[in-house]
Structures are given as C-alpha cells and as structure tokens.
C-alpha cells in the first residue's frame, strides 16, 4: 500500500474516534450519574401517589370519627316524671316515705283565730300551693307558687343510750324552689332541703299572714 494512502486512512480513523462520546473521567457528579444513569432517570420520573396514608394519618382519622354518645337523651327522665292530673310534680317521694302512725294536724291561724284544721295523717305526702289540680293543701295568696312546698312523712332512725335503734315516722317540710320562699318559725329555710317538724312549729308560705301550726292529737282528743 502506498505510504500516502496509509496516512490518509490513519487520519480518517482518528477523526471518527474523536467524534465518539467518551466516558467522563474522575469521581465527580457526572461520573456518578454515568454509572447510575438509568436509576437517576427513574427517580426523576417519580410522581406522588395519591390516596396513600401513613399511621399518623390513620390515628388522626380515627380520632375524628364520632364516638357513640351514651349520655342521657332526656327520654328516661321524662319517663320517670310523676304526674297528677296531667301536671308534672316538682316532688317525688323518697324511698323511706311512710304514712304516719300518729294523728298529726295543722291548724291554720289568721289574726289569732283558727280558720281551718287540716288532717295530715292519712297519706305520706302533702303538696302545698296555688295549683288546685295538684295541691293537697291550697294556699290562695298571690305570693305563693303553684307548687310551693311539701310536707313529707318518712322514717327516722336513731340509737338510744342503751344502743337500741329506734325508728319512728316524722314530718318534714321542704320548699320546692318557690318564688317567695317558706319560713319555719319565722325563719327562711333553704329550698330543696328537708327540715324536720316538731310539735308547735309554725310554717309560713310566701308573704301570706296565715300561720300553719303543727300539732299531734291524742286518741282521746280525736
């Protein structure tokens, strides 16, 4: 082969070799991408996946779910309400309520004169107030509430000096959150609290001037 043709062939080979893509040298970022070219491409193509959730999101979602409510709906309370002639009573008798075994009386005084005698030994509870459909003892004064107060007989137990338990039936008075209050021996009493009544105690309701005196009648006097 002529020397000239050989030199031209070598030059053509050198040009084609220099046009090839050469692998970068060194340990730089380009070199690392060269080694992991396919993986890097995959990472760049990644897209967020919608609808996924981690444990934290699941816990938060569970907390947002409404819990069952076992509270009272009011229906049970309504079913327990005691009515008389279609009117809900403000008072319900306690478990130790009892019909008295003595002849209790209430003498109603106005201007030092007896105007009425009330027999309060035939039942365990007496509602006092202006509402004629529920009141066992009517009070017509305008300052008295419809269901003003109650006289409740119930058992009372105490231990004597000998250690014996003595049980008897005693009368109590309780104001039913009346507008103008109840007085025992001229002193206001606290609403919704039982006060034991003793013989010769005096009750007043609202601003009425009538005195209601508590007494017990012996068999001979009855």
Image (spheres, helix red, strand yellow):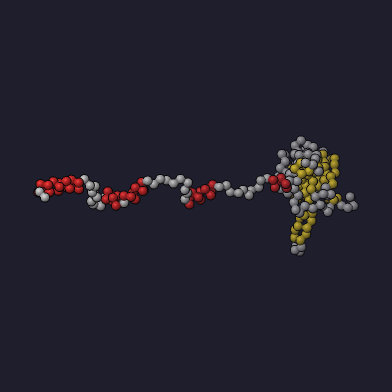
Which percent across, then down, holds residue 126?
79, 46
Q: Residue at x 73, y 47 (%)?
A: 80
Residue lying furthest front in this view?
Answer: 1
The answer to whether residue 215 of the structure is visible from this angle is no
Could you say which is closer to the camera, residue 196 or residue 36? 36
Could you say which is closer to the camera, residue 5 or residue 176? 5
Which percent across, then down, holds residue 192?
71, 46
Could you say which quadrant of the image residue 160 lies in? bottom right
Could you say which is closer to the camera, residue 158 or residue 78? 78
Could you say which is closer to the camera, residue 160 or residue 73? 73
Q: Residue at x 72, y 41 (%)?
A: 178
Residue lying furthest left in this view?
Answer: 3
Which percent across, then down, holds residue 132?
80, 39
Q: Residue at x 22, y 47 (%)?
A: 20
The answer to whether residue 110 of the structure is visible from this angle is yes
Could you say which quadrant of the image residue 210 lies in? top right
Q: How many marks?
A: 0
Q: Height in image: 146 above or below 76?
A: above
């Amino acid at each position: 082969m002529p020397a000239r043709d050989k030199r031209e062939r070598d030059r053509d080979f050198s040009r084609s070799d220099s046009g090839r893509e050469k692998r970068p040298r060194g340990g730089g970022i380009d070199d690392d991408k060269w080694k992991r070219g396919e993986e890097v491409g995959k990472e760049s193509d990644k897209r967020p996946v919608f609808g996924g959730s981690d444990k934290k999101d699941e816990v938060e979602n569970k907390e947002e779910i409404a819990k069952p409510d076992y509270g009272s709906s009011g229906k049970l309370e309504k079913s327990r309400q005691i009515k008389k002639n279609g009117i809900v009573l403000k008072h319900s008798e306690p478990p130790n309520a009892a019909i008295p075994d003595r002849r209790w009386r209430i003498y109603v005084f106005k201007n030092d004169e007896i105007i009425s005698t009330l027999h309060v030994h035939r039942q365990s509870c007496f509602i006092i107030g202006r509402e004629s459909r529920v009141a066992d003892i009517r009070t017509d004064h305008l300052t008295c509430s419809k269901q003003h107060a109650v006289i409740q007989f119930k058992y009372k137990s105490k231990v004597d000096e000998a250690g014996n338990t003595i049980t008897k039936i005693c009368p109590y008075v309780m104001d039913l959150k009346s507008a103008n209050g109840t007085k025992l021996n001229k002193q206001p009493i606290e609403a919704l609290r039982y006060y034991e009544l003793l013989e010769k105690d005096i009750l007043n309701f609202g601003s009425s001037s009538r005195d209601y005196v508590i007494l017990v009648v012996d068999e001979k006097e009855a």
